Image (cartoon, rainbow, N blue to C red):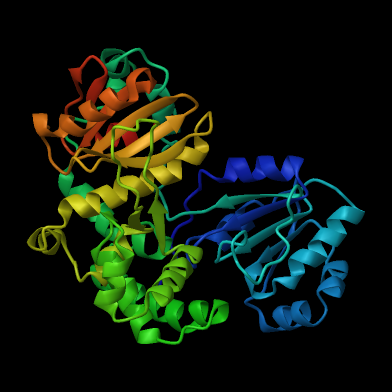
Protein backbone atom coordinates (compact mmCIF):
# COMPACT_ATOMS: atom_id res chain seq x y z
CA UNK A 1 0.00 0.00 0.00
CA UNK A 2 1.37 3.41 -0.98
CA UNK A 3 2.19 5.55 2.07
CA UNK A 4 -0.35 8.36 2.50
CA UNK A 5 0.67 11.96 2.00
CA UNK A 6 1.62 13.88 5.12
CA UNK A 7 -1.24 15.98 6.48
CA UNK A 8 -0.25 18.76 8.94
CA UNK A 9 -2.06 18.37 12.25
CA UNK A 10 -3.67 21.20 14.21
CA UNK A 11 -2.15 19.81 17.43
CA UNK A 12 1.40 20.57 16.23
CA UNK A 13 1.25 24.12 17.62
CA UNK A 14 -0.04 23.17 21.10
CA UNK A 15 2.52 20.34 21.39
CA UNK A 16 5.41 22.62 20.42
CA UNK A 17 4.18 25.16 22.95
CA UNK A 18 4.18 22.43 25.60
CA UNK A 19 7.76 21.49 24.71
CA UNK A 20 8.82 25.11 25.18
CA UNK A 21 7.49 25.21 28.73
CA UNK A 22 7.38 21.65 30.14
CA UNK A 23 9.99 18.88 30.38
CA UNK A 24 7.65 16.28 28.86
CA UNK A 25 4.92 16.37 26.23
CA UNK A 26 2.70 13.37 25.62
CA UNK A 27 0.64 12.30 22.60
CA UNK A 28 -1.96 9.61 23.14
CA UNK A 29 -4.46 8.18 20.68
CA UNK A 30 -5.62 5.10 18.84
CA UNK A 31 -3.17 2.95 16.90
CA UNK A 32 -2.53 4.16 13.33
CA UNK A 33 -3.98 7.60 14.05
CA UNK A 34 -0.71 9.34 13.13
CA UNK A 35 1.11 9.75 16.46
CA UNK A 36 4.50 8.59 15.16
CA UNK A 37 4.23 10.73 12.03
CA UNK A 38 3.28 13.81 14.04
CA UNK A 39 6.04 13.25 16.59
CA UNK A 40 8.73 12.90 13.90
CA UNK A 41 7.41 15.96 12.03
CA UNK A 42 8.26 18.09 15.08
CA UNK A 43 11.99 17.35 14.84
CA UNK A 44 13.85 20.46 13.67
CA UNK A 45 17.05 22.43 14.15
CA UNK A 46 15.36 24.13 17.11
CA UNK A 47 14.31 20.79 18.63
CA UNK A 48 16.80 18.16 17.34
CA UNK A 49 15.23 15.13 19.01
CA UNK A 50 16.17 11.50 18.40
CA UNK A 51 13.25 9.18 17.60
CA UNK A 52 12.99 5.72 19.18
CA UNK A 53 10.04 3.33 19.07
CA UNK A 54 9.28 0.50 21.45
CA UNK A 55 7.81 -1.38 18.51
CA UNK A 56 11.48 -2.16 17.86
CA UNK A 57 12.23 -5.44 19.65
CA UNK A 58 15.75 -4.49 20.72
CA UNK A 59 14.62 -1.13 22.12
CA UNK A 60 11.70 -2.74 23.94
CA UNK A 61 13.90 -5.43 25.50
CA UNK A 62 16.39 -2.83 26.73
CA UNK A 63 13.62 -0.63 28.15
CA UNK A 64 12.00 -3.55 29.99
CA UNK A 65 15.24 -4.94 31.43
CA UNK A 66 16.78 -1.67 32.64
CA UNK A 67 14.48 1.38 32.35
CA UNK A 68 16.87 3.73 34.20
CA UNK A 69 19.85 2.61 32.13
CA UNK A 70 17.82 3.00 28.94
CA UNK A 71 16.95 6.61 29.78
CA UNK A 72 20.51 7.44 30.90
CA UNK A 73 21.93 5.95 27.70
CA UNK A 74 19.62 7.95 25.43
CA UNK A 75 19.96 11.63 26.36
CA UNK A 76 17.31 14.25 25.56
CA UNK A 77 15.75 15.61 23.51
CA UNK A 78 14.22 12.19 22.90
CA UNK A 79 10.99 10.88 21.37
CA UNK A 80 9.77 7.62 22.90
CA UNK A 81 7.05 6.05 20.75
CA UNK A 82 4.53 3.48 22.11
CA UNK A 83 5.73 3.98 25.68
CA UNK A 84 2.76 2.03 27.09
CA UNK A 85 4.66 -1.15 26.12
CA UNK A 86 7.18 -0.42 28.92
CA UNK A 87 5.29 1.50 31.63
CA UNK A 88 8.29 1.51 34.00
CA UNK A 89 9.98 3.96 31.64
CA UNK A 90 7.75 6.74 32.93
CA UNK A 91 9.16 6.32 36.45
CA UNK A 92 12.67 6.44 34.99
CA UNK A 93 11.68 9.57 33.06
CA UNK A 94 10.50 11.18 36.29
CA UNK A 95 13.90 10.64 37.87
CA UNK A 96 15.72 12.05 34.86
CA UNK A 97 13.45 15.09 34.68
CA UNK A 98 13.79 15.79 38.40
CA UNK A 99 17.58 15.69 38.12
CA UNK A 100 17.73 17.92 35.04
CA UNK A 101 14.52 19.88 34.65
CA UNK A 102 14.75 21.32 31.14
CA UNK A 103 11.82 22.15 28.84
CA UNK A 104 11.44 19.96 25.77
CA UNK A 105 13.42 17.02 27.11
CA UNK A 106 11.02 14.24 26.14
CA UNK A 107 8.06 13.55 23.89
CA UNK A 108 6.25 10.29 24.64
CA UNK A 109 3.45 8.67 22.67
CA UNK A 110 1.06 5.85 23.52
CA UNK A 111 -1.79 3.94 21.91
CA UNK A 112 -3.61 3.86 25.23
CA UNK A 113 -4.61 6.60 27.63
CA UNK A 114 -1.54 6.71 29.87
CA UNK A 115 -3.42 8.62 32.56
CA UNK A 116 -5.91 5.79 33.11
CA UNK A 117 -3.80 2.73 32.27
CA UNK A 118 -3.70 0.61 35.44
CA UNK A 119 -0.18 -0.65 34.76
CA UNK A 120 1.13 2.93 34.77
CA UNK A 121 1.80 4.08 38.32
CA UNK A 122 3.62 7.26 37.28
CA UNK A 123 1.81 9.94 35.22
CA UNK A 124 4.54 12.64 35.48
CA UNK A 125 2.08 15.02 37.16
CA UNK A 126 3.38 18.59 37.05
CA UNK A 127 6.09 17.60 34.59
CA UNK A 128 4.08 16.63 31.51
CA UNK A 129 1.16 17.86 29.43
CA UNK A 130 -0.74 15.21 27.46
CA UNK A 131 -2.50 15.79 24.14
CA UNK A 132 -5.08 13.46 22.58
CA UNK A 133 -4.52 12.94 18.87
CA UNK A 134 -7.78 11.91 17.24
CA UNK A 135 -8.40 10.82 13.63
CA UNK A 136 -7.88 13.47 10.97
CA UNK A 137 -10.44 16.25 11.08
CA UNK A 138 -12.35 17.58 8.10
CA UNK A 139 -10.39 20.84 8.20
CA UNK A 140 -7.03 19.02 8.35
CA UNK A 141 -7.92 16.90 5.34
CA UNK A 142 -8.96 20.06 3.48
CA UNK A 143 -5.75 21.89 4.42
CA UNK A 144 -7.67 24.55 6.34
CA UNK A 145 -7.31 26.15 9.75
CA UNK A 146 -9.22 24.68 12.67
CA UNK A 147 -12.89 25.72 13.04
CA UNK A 148 -12.13 26.70 16.65
CA UNK A 149 -12.57 30.42 15.87
CA UNK A 150 -16.09 29.77 14.54
CA UNK A 151 -16.98 27.86 17.69
CA UNK A 152 -15.46 30.60 19.87
CA UNK A 153 -17.68 33.18 18.17
CA UNK A 154 -20.83 31.37 19.35
CA UNK A 155 -19.98 32.66 22.82
CA UNK A 156 -18.99 36.13 21.61
CA UNK A 157 -21.67 37.35 19.21
CA UNK A 158 -24.89 39.05 20.24
CA UNK A 159 -27.43 36.93 18.50
CA UNK A 160 -27.94 34.93 15.33
CA UNK A 161 -27.69 37.83 12.89
CA UNK A 162 -24.28 38.90 14.12
CA UNK A 163 -23.02 35.32 13.77
CA UNK A 164 -24.32 35.19 10.17
CA UNK A 165 -22.67 38.51 9.31
CA UNK A 166 -19.34 37.37 10.73
CA UNK A 167 -19.16 34.08 8.84
CA UNK A 168 -21.17 34.67 5.66
CA UNK A 169 -17.97 34.40 3.57
CA UNK A 170 -17.65 30.72 4.56
CA UNK A 171 -20.95 29.77 2.93
CA UNK A 172 -20.45 27.54 -0.12
CA UNK A 173 -23.68 27.42 -2.19
CA UNK A 174 -22.53 24.33 -4.10
CA UNK A 175 -21.55 22.28 -1.02
CA UNK A 176 -22.08 18.61 -1.88
CA UNK A 177 -23.87 16.23 0.47
CA UNK A 178 -22.42 13.35 -1.55
CA UNK A 179 -18.89 14.52 -0.79
CA UNK A 180 -19.76 14.86 2.89
CA UNK A 181 -21.25 11.35 2.96
CA UNK A 182 -18.08 10.00 1.36
CA UNK A 183 -15.95 11.79 3.96
CA UNK A 184 -18.01 10.34 6.81
CA UNK A 185 -17.63 6.82 5.40
CA UNK A 186 -13.89 7.25 4.89
CA UNK A 187 -13.32 8.39 8.47
CA UNK A 188 -10.12 10.01 9.68
CA UNK A 189 -7.47 7.31 10.02
CA UNK A 190 -4.82 8.57 7.58
CA UNK A 191 -4.33 5.35 5.61
CA UNK A 192 -8.07 4.86 5.15
CA UNK A 193 -9.04 8.52 4.74
CA UNK A 194 -6.48 9.28 2.05
CA UNK A 195 -7.10 6.37 -0.27
CA UNK A 196 -9.64 6.80 -3.03
CA UNK A 197 -10.16 3.07 -3.45
CA UNK A 198 -13.06 1.65 -1.37
CA UNK A 199 -11.67 -1.89 -1.69
CA UNK A 200 -8.30 -0.84 -0.29
CA UNK A 201 -10.09 0.99 2.53
CA UNK A 202 -12.10 -2.12 3.47
CA UNK A 203 -8.94 -4.23 3.52
CA UNK A 204 -7.23 -1.66 5.72
CA UNK A 205 -10.12 -1.62 8.21
CA UNK A 206 -10.13 -5.42 8.38
CA UNK A 207 -6.39 -5.47 9.01
CA UNK A 208 -6.79 -2.80 11.67
CA UNK A 209 -9.52 -4.80 13.39
CA UNK A 210 -7.45 -7.97 13.47
CA UNK A 211 -4.29 -6.24 14.69
CA UNK A 212 -6.21 -4.39 17.38
CA UNK A 213 -7.78 -7.61 18.67
CA UNK A 214 -4.72 -9.85 18.43
CA UNK A 215 -2.06 -7.42 19.63
CA UNK A 216 -3.23 -4.20 21.27
CA UNK A 217 -5.97 -5.66 23.45
CA UNK A 218 -3.88 -8.67 24.51
CA UNK A 219 -0.94 -6.42 25.37
CA UNK A 220 -3.05 -4.33 27.75
CA UNK A 221 -5.46 -6.69 29.47
CA UNK A 222 -6.61 -10.26 29.90
CA UNK A 223 -9.73 -10.75 27.76
CA UNK A 224 -11.31 -14.08 28.62
CA UNK A 225 -13.91 -14.05 25.86
CA UNK A 226 -12.29 -12.56 22.74
CA UNK A 227 -15.28 -13.45 20.49
CA UNK A 228 -17.57 -11.54 22.88
CA UNK A 229 -15.14 -8.60 22.88
CA UNK A 230 -15.17 -8.62 19.06
CA UNK A 231 -18.99 -8.68 19.07
CA UNK A 232 -18.95 -5.73 21.46
CA UNK A 233 -16.76 -3.80 19.03
CA UNK A 234 -19.36 -4.40 16.30
CA UNK A 235 -22.32 -3.73 18.60
CA UNK A 236 -20.93 -0.38 19.71
CA UNK A 237 -20.62 0.56 16.03
CA UNK A 238 -24.29 -0.26 15.53
CA UNK A 239 -25.28 1.73 18.63
CA UNK A 240 -23.04 4.75 18.13
CA UNK A 241 -24.83 8.00 18.97
CA UNK A 242 -27.26 6.27 21.34
CA UNK A 243 -27.69 6.53 25.09
CA UNK A 244 -25.84 3.64 26.69
CA UNK A 245 -27.88 0.94 28.43
CA UNK A 246 -25.25 -1.36 29.93
CA UNK A 247 -27.66 -3.94 31.36
CA UNK A 248 -29.37 -4.39 27.99
CA UNK A 249 -26.02 -4.56 26.21
CA UNK A 250 -24.71 -7.23 28.60
CA UNK A 251 -27.82 -9.35 27.99
CA UNK A 252 -27.53 -9.00 24.22
CA UNK A 253 -23.89 -10.09 24.29
CA UNK A 254 -24.43 -12.85 26.84
CA UNK A 255 -21.71 -11.64 29.22
CA UNK A 256 -21.85 -10.66 32.92
CA UNK A 257 -22.46 -7.00 33.66
CA UNK A 258 -19.04 -6.70 35.34
CA UNK A 259 -17.35 -8.14 32.24
CA UNK A 260 -19.18 -5.71 29.97
CA UNK A 261 -18.07 -2.73 32.07
CA UNK A 262 -14.46 -3.90 31.93
CA UNK A 263 -14.61 -4.42 28.16
CA UNK A 264 -16.19 -1.01 27.59
CA UNK A 265 -13.44 0.57 29.70
CA UNK A 266 -10.85 -1.19 27.54
CA UNK A 267 -12.47 0.14 24.35
CA UNK A 268 -12.38 3.64 25.84
CA UNK A 269 -8.81 3.23 27.08
CA UNK A 270 -7.66 2.34 23.57
CA UNK A 271 -9.58 5.19 21.91
CA UNK A 272 -12.09 3.02 20.03
CA UNK A 273 -15.15 4.55 21.72
CA UNK A 274 -15.84 7.53 23.95
CA UNK A 275 -18.68 8.55 26.21
CA UNK A 276 -20.48 11.88 26.23
CA UNK A 277 -21.89 12.73 29.65
CA UNK A 278 -25.31 14.32 30.19
CA UNK A 279 -25.53 17.94 31.27
CA UNK A 280 -27.35 18.56 34.55
CA UNK A 281 -28.68 21.90 35.71
CA UNK A 282 -29.80 22.86 39.21
CA UNK A 283 -33.48 22.51 38.43
CA UNK A 284 -35.21 20.14 40.89
CA UNK A 285 -38.43 20.12 38.88
CA UNK A 286 -36.76 18.83 35.70
CA UNK A 287 -35.97 15.11 35.53
CA UNK A 288 -32.95 14.51 33.32
CA UNK A 289 -31.39 11.45 31.72
CA UNK A 290 -28.33 10.26 33.65
CA UNK A 291 -26.74 7.68 31.33
CA UNK A 292 -23.99 8.72 28.89
CA UNK A 293 -24.11 8.55 25.12
CA UNK A 294 -21.75 6.15 23.38
CA UNK A 295 -19.84 7.25 20.29
CA UNK A 296 -17.37 5.40 18.08
CA UNK A 297 -14.17 7.39 17.72
CA UNK A 298 -14.12 7.08 13.92
CA UNK A 299 -17.12 6.96 11.60
CA UNK A 300 -15.17 5.14 8.89
CA UNK A 301 -14.34 2.22 11.16
CA UNK A 302 -17.85 2.26 12.64
CA UNK A 303 -19.41 2.08 9.17
CA UNK A 304 -17.11 -0.80 8.22
CA UNK A 305 -17.93 -2.75 11.40
CA UNK A 306 -21.67 -2.19 10.82
CA UNK A 307 -21.40 -3.43 7.20
CA UNK A 308 -22.27 -0.03 5.72
CA UNK A 309 -20.07 -0.01 2.60
CA UNK A 310 -21.77 2.96 0.95
CA UNK A 311 -24.31 5.64 1.81
CA UNK A 312 -27.13 3.61 0.24
CA UNK A 313 -26.41 0.91 2.84
CA UNK A 314 -26.46 3.57 5.58
CA UNK A 315 -29.90 4.73 4.42
CA UNK A 316 -31.22 1.16 4.12
CA UNK A 317 -30.31 0.64 7.76
CA UNK A 318 -31.85 4.01 8.67
CA UNK A 319 -28.63 5.15 10.32
CA UNK A 320 -27.84 8.34 8.39
CA UNK A 321 -28.81 10.65 11.27
CA UNK A 322 -27.00 8.46 13.79
CA UNK A 323 -23.77 8.35 11.77
CA UNK A 324 -23.90 12.07 10.99
CA UNK A 325 -24.33 12.87 14.68
CA UNK A 326 -21.35 10.65 15.50
CA UNK A 327 -19.26 12.48 12.92
CA UNK A 328 -20.29 15.93 14.22
CA UNK A 329 -19.50 14.77 17.77
CA UNK A 330 -16.03 13.73 16.65
CA UNK A 331 -15.37 17.00 14.82
CA UNK A 332 -16.38 18.98 17.90
CA UNK A 333 -14.17 16.80 20.10
CA UNK A 334 -11.21 17.52 17.80
CA UNK A 335 -11.85 21.29 17.65
CA UNK A 336 -12.61 22.13 21.29
CA UNK A 337 -9.03 21.71 22.64
CA UNK A 338 -7.97 24.36 20.11
CA UNK A 339 -10.49 26.96 21.26
CA UNK A 340 -9.40 30.20 22.91
CA UNK A 341 -10.91 29.18 26.27
CA UNK A 342 -11.61 25.86 27.94
CA UNK A 343 -14.92 24.52 26.63
CA UNK A 344 -16.71 21.39 27.87
CA UNK A 345 -18.87 19.12 25.71
CA UNK A 346 -22.09 17.50 26.98
CA UNK A 347 -25.52 16.42 25.76
CA UNK A 348 -28.87 17.30 27.31
CA UNK A 349 -31.99 15.14 27.56
CA UNK A 350 -35.03 15.19 29.80
CA UNK A 351 -37.39 12.35 30.65
CA UNK A 352 -40.11 14.45 29.01
CA UNK A 353 -38.53 13.67 25.64
CA UNK A 354 -36.77 16.98 25.01
CA UNK A 355 -33.11 16.69 24.05
CA UNK A 356 -30.22 18.57 22.49
CA UNK A 357 -27.44 16.63 20.81
CA UNK A 358 -24.59 18.75 22.16
CA UNK A 359 -24.13 21.39 24.83
CA UNK A 360 -20.97 23.49 24.86
CA UNK A 361 -20.23 25.00 28.26
CA UNK A 362 -17.77 27.82 28.86
CA UNK A 363 -17.80 29.37 32.30
CA UNK A 364 -21.35 30.43 33.05
CA UNK A 365 -22.41 30.35 29.38
CA UNK A 366 -23.70 27.53 27.20
CA UNK A 367 -24.44 26.87 23.53
CA UNK A 368 -26.78 24.15 22.31
CA UNK A 369 -26.15 22.34 19.01
CA UNK A 370 -28.55 20.07 17.13
CA UNK A 371 -27.16 17.94 14.28
CA UNK A 372 -29.59 17.23 11.43
CA UNK A 373 -28.79 15.17 8.35
CA UNK A 374 -30.90 17.15 5.96
CA UNK A 375 -30.64 20.11 3.61
CA UNK A 376 -33.63 21.87 5.18
CA UNK A 377 -34.49 22.67 8.79
CA UNK A 378 -38.04 22.26 10.10
CA UNK A 379 -39.56 23.66 13.28
CA UNK A 380 -39.22 20.30 15.04
CA UNK A 381 -35.48 20.89 15.22
CA UNK A 382 -36.12 23.85 17.55
CA UNK A 383 -38.03 21.97 20.24
CA UNK A 384 -35.01 20.72 22.13
CA UNK A 385 -33.15 24.02 21.86
CA UNK A 386 -36.23 25.94 23.03
CA UNK A 387 -36.58 23.63 26.03
CA UNK A 388 -32.88 23.97 26.86
CA UNK A 389 -33.16 27.76 26.63
CA UNK A 390 -36.12 27.75 29.02
CA UNK A 391 -34.27 25.51 31.49
CA UNK A 392 -30.95 27.38 31.28
CA UNK A 393 -32.30 30.93 31.43
CA UNK A 394 -29.64 33.60 31.18
CA UNK A 395 -26.88 31.01 30.75
CA UNK A 396 -28.12 30.21 27.23
CA UNK A 397 -26.07 32.15 24.70
CA UNK A 398 -26.87 30.57 21.36
CA UNK A 399 -28.69 27.67 19.75
CA UNK A 400 -27.38 26.10 16.53
CA UNK A 401 -29.02 23.69 14.11
CA UNK A 402 -26.16 22.32 12.02
CA UNK A 403 -27.39 20.84 8.74
CA UNK A 404 -26.12 19.68 5.33
CA UNK A 405 -27.74 22.36 3.20
CA UNK A 406 -26.15 25.61 1.92
CA UNK A 407 -28.29 28.14 3.79
CA UNK A 408 -27.38 30.05 6.96
CA UNK A 409 -30.45 31.70 8.45
CA UNK A 410 -31.69 33.06 11.78
CA UNK A 411 -34.48 30.88 13.21
CA UNK A 412 -34.92 33.10 16.27
CA UNK A 413 -33.04 35.97 17.87
CA UNK A 414 -30.54 33.55 19.43
CA UNK A 415 -30.99 30.39 17.31
CA UNK A 416 -29.34 29.98 13.92
CA UNK A 417 -29.34 27.30 11.21
CA UNK A 418 -25.73 26.78 10.08
CA UNK A 419 -24.41 24.65 7.20
CA UNK A 420 -22.06 22.02 8.55
CA UNK A 421 -19.21 23.25 6.36
CA UNK A 422 -19.44 26.70 8.01
CA UNK A 423 -19.38 25.38 11.57
CA UNK A 424 -16.87 22.55 11.15
CA UNK A 425 -15.22 22.83 7.73
CA UNK A 426 -12.41 25.11 8.89
CA UNK A 427 -11.22 28.53 7.82
CA UNK A 428 -9.29 29.04 4.53
Q: Is residue 227 left or right of residue 29?
A: left
Question: In this rendering, does residue 426 appear at all?
Answer: no
Q: Nearer the viewer, residue 143 or 65?
A: 65
- Look at the image and tell me in which quarter the N terminus lies: bottom left
**Between 146 and 252, which is closer to the camera in this rendering?**
252
Hey, which quadrant is residue 171 in on the image? top left
At x 34% / y 72%, what residue is drawn? Answer: 233
Q: Position of residue 182 (x, y in %)?
A: 22, 55
Image quarter of residue 261: bottom left
Image spot of residue 218 (x, y percent)? 52, 82
Instruction: Check the picture and name the quadrant holding the C terminus.
Output: top left
Give the residue displayed 47% in from the left and 51% down from the top. Answer: 7
Q: Which residue sits at x=54%, y=79%?
A: 221
Say above or below: 232 vs 149: below
**Which x, y percent locates residue 225?**
40, 86
Give percent across and percent down for residue 333: 42, 45
Give the residue at the far front of this rendering. 284
- Which picture quadrant has residue 95? bottom right
Q: In this orientation, which residue lies closer to the viewer: 274 or 248? A: 248
Q: What is the total number of numbered labels drawn onto the structure image? A: 0
Query: In the rendered view, does 95 fall on the left or right side of 279?
Result: right
In the image: residue 166, left or right of residue 374: right
Q: Is residue 98 above or below residue 392?
A: below
Position above or below: 22 against 157: below
Q: Is residue 49 above or below residue 198?
A: above
At horizontal 38% and vertical 76% (from top left) the residue drawn is: 209
- On the question of residue 296 being in view, the answer is yes
Amino acid sequence: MTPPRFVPRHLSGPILRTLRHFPVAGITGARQVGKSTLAQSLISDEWPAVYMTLDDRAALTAALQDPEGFIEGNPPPLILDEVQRAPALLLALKGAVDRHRRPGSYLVTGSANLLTLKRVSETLAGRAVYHELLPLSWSELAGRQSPAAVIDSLFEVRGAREFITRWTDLVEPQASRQELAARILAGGYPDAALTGDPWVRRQWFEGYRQTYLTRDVRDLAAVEHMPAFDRLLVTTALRTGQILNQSELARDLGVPYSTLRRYLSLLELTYQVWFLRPYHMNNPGLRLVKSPKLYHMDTGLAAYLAAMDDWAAVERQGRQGQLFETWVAGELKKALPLCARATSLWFWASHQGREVDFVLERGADMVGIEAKWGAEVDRAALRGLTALKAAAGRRFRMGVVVHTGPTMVALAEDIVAVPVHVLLGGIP
